[in-house]
Amino acid sequence: MVVISQAIICSPEECYSHISTENHLTILTQNIRSIYKNLDSFQVMIQSLKIDCDVLVMTECHISKFKSIPNLNNNYYTYFTHITLNQCDGVVFYVKKNLNHKIFEPNIKNASCLVLTLRDTVIIGVYRTPSIRNSDEFTSSLQSLLQNYNSYQNIIITGDVNIDIKIDNNDSNSPNYLTTLAYYGILPAHRLPTRDKMCYDHMMIKSTHSAKSLVLTNALTDHNTVILNLLFEPERRNILKTKITVNFDATLNEIQTDLTDILSLTDPSDAAKVLVDKISTAMSKNQIIKIIPSRKRHIKPWITPGVLRCLRNRDKLHLKFKKNPFNEILKVTYTRYRNFCSKLVRKLKLTYDRNNLTDSANKNPKLLWKTIKSICNLNNNNNDHAHNLVSLKHTPIESANCANNYFSKLGQRLVENLSKSTIAYSSTVIDNNNNYSLPNSFVLLETDPAEINTVIANLSNASAPGWDNIPTAFIKMAKTYLTPVLCHIYNLCFEKGCFPSV
């Protein structure tokens, strides 16, 4: 069987020179041998690639029901399989957030599988357990799945399939598997060895576009990394390319002498509107627009240049050892250095997490719990709103109507659930001196600058601004000038019984 893409063996550092960085879809697959154990080392490895992959497919993830799947970074959504056959099973997808995509988990015989669909592209990530040697049921099940996607322009099947497709292989499962895929026009992107002398980690494609596949030699696990670079641009979401910041010092200088006229206003709504307009106008004049690089990389702080050099040396020793597998000196040298690198990565990550915990513990409990959730992967907000809605009902519109129906009737349900004794509660109560009091009444006493200063000082800078986009940090900076005006407006509100619309 032919190979329909250019296939190259190279090191991670050489990868960048072979990959197109424009109008492309880049897919990486890696047998990770436990997503919990080796993801940190994997992140160090992909840091040396100097490219952003659109989809990363992790196989043999050892997914546990009792552990959260770790996030890669803020640029990716995380998806994983729930159907497991044994403790080694599991496929994890990391998908770039700017891709328009859908994902689901089919039921494939003797395998874990996730399916990612783009507009005219389908990516099928597979991990087939080697414990069941005969792959006929798996191949038949995969064939049934492919019938649903035969009309797609681009089909990619990738992952650790544990079927050797290298030329002149001795795997009895290979002919049926390759013939079945060839029926749908799906051919190997490479037939290079990915584990010892076997080609177990596949990149099978059907596409009219040019493609290039790379097999990266590294010692992350006993499986090499495989990358497919497909030369076409998938549909992507619009991403923010600029960032707006405000020069608070200049804004403060502008409003210092511009607020005194508010103190002469007697209508609280007018006074509040003038205050918000003056601050908003001053902030708009002092905005700074910064361009965000479209391919800005997310770098983990604990990944240092030194650890990258260590992994390069480890991979060089691994390559020498593979060429001379019976050289005991090379074997011992490589093994010791590999273990040293693994310990170094774990130590760097542990030190970084420990320092984060210490710093956050010294600041406030909210930041401490945020750090704990980040370390324990408890804050996985992986899906965007469309995916969350689809998971509620069959379509986003049905899901939105369902959610709206629930919250719009929430108050009515609370009233209906109130006990009759609560509803019948007397509006008047007699105290010990036989005086009547009104428990449902309250009084608003005039505020003063000291109280307002105290309230402003206790505001959290992390709180989101309101619709007017005036941040808490600026209110704190300008409290000397804002306090008299706010005091005047609040007391007008109490006096007039009015709550300004702004």
Image: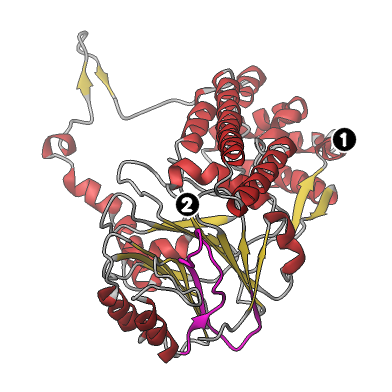
Name the main secondary structure of what is drawn in magenta: loop
Residue 32 tag number: 2
As drawn, the residue found furthest toward the left would be: 420
Q: Residues within 10 Å of mark 2 (few under 14, many from 20)?
A: many
Residue 204 coordinates in the image, percent (x, y): 50, 77
Which residues make up the magenta segment?
Answer: 185-212
Residue found 45% across the figure and 36% down from its top: 376
Residue 281 coordinates in the image, percent (x, y): 79, 50
Residue found 12% across the figure and 39% down from its top: 420
Alpha-carbon span between mark 2 and mark 1: 56 Å
Q: Residues within 10 Å of mark 1 (few under 14, many from 20)?
A: few
Q: Is residue 365 above or below residue 134?
A: above
Give, as a three-letter code, the residue at label 1.
Asn
Residue found 57% across the figure and 28% down from its top: 347
Looking at the picture, tell me which residue is in the foreground, 94 or 277.
94
Is residue 253 at least partly visible in the picture? yes
Give SS at disc 2.
loop
Residue 132 coordinates in the image, percent (x, y): 26, 64
Q: Is residue 499 above or below residue 17?
A: above
Give, as a three-letter code, the residue at label 2.
Ile
Residue 253 tag number: 1
Q: How is the image coloured?
A: secondary structure
342 displayed left or right of 247: left
